[in-house]
Image (tube, helix red, strand yellow):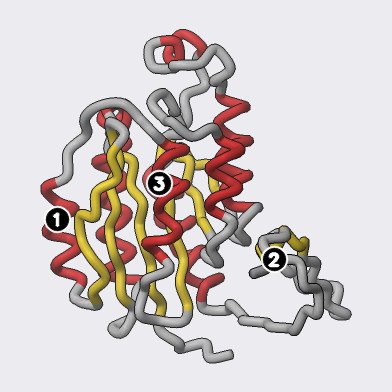
Amino acid sequence: HNFEAPLSLTVLLDVSGSMALQDKLKESKEALNYLLACLLDLHDEVSLLIFADGDVEVAANFSNNKNVFLTVLDKTEAYGKTALNDAVAVSPEFANKGNNEKRALLLITDGIENDSQYSHEQAVEIARTVDIPIYTIGYKIPLSEEYLRKYKHSPALSSSSIVYSLERFSSATGGKAFFINQPNELKTALREIKNELSHQYILGYTSYGNIENEYRKIKVITSKKKFKVRTREGYYSG
């Protein structure tokens, strides 16, 4: 383990129409500026994926030149519907192309889902086939049923189902979910995420099972009770 090992971070940013409301996209962009200017190290690299209307676009490829990311981010505007499940399904594979051994995906969204081909369960299954932790920030999740009614495609969409979905994306992959309503809380969450990624360990072991494409659960415990260990839930053999 090396606390100073460089990070390859992929930001998956929701730019759908609902993010234009309540300054959600504007404040998310300001927080990302803070992340790159104050938290990421010189040798950390970052990429930007944006999603709306069923498309996931590589807005900025991996680079440790933070100005590339920030220039594209500044021009990003909100539009269209939200295919959240589809975006989560395809993004970890891209994030796994980072040049550094330490990699992670940061999802920022208001959690509204109304345009995906994949179900939530399918997105989780696909995402956890790749060894990339997903850190999720649910920003200003709508609590009003009247508000949700304007955007939701499925009657099952509710504030509680949004929280469950975002938590599952993170827990299944070894990341963590944050639910935030204020701009200053965004910065606090980003500091916690960066700090945690600086204290990330890579553990390996040999399995003698010979069944391919089998999902195997993982449990890591420590003898020191004061420490909390969080890992991905498992992996696929093969």
Residue under label 3: 108
Q: Which mark is residue 41?
A: none
Residue 82 in the image: above or below residue 233: above
**Residue type for callout 2:** Glu
- Circle 2 SS class: loop
**Residue type for callout 1:** Val
Q: Which mark is residue 72?
A: 1
Instruction: Choose the circle earlier in sequence order: 2 or 3.
Output: 3
Q: Position of residue 25 (x, y in %)?
A: 28, 39
Q: Position of residue 13 (x, y in %)?
A: 33, 47
Q: Position of residue 226 (x, y in %)?
A: 81, 73
Instruction: Choose the circle earlier in sequence order: 3 or 1.
Output: 1
Question: How crowded is the residue under tag 3: few (<14 C-alpha within 10 Å), some, or many (20+)?
Answer: many
At horizontal 31% and vertical 34% (from top left) the residue drawn is: 54
Question: How crowded is the residue under tag 1: few (<14 C-alpha within 10 Å), some, or many (20+)?
Answer: few
Decide which of 169, 97 is in the foreground and name it: 97
Instruction: Choose the circle earlier in sequence order: 1 or 2.
Output: 1
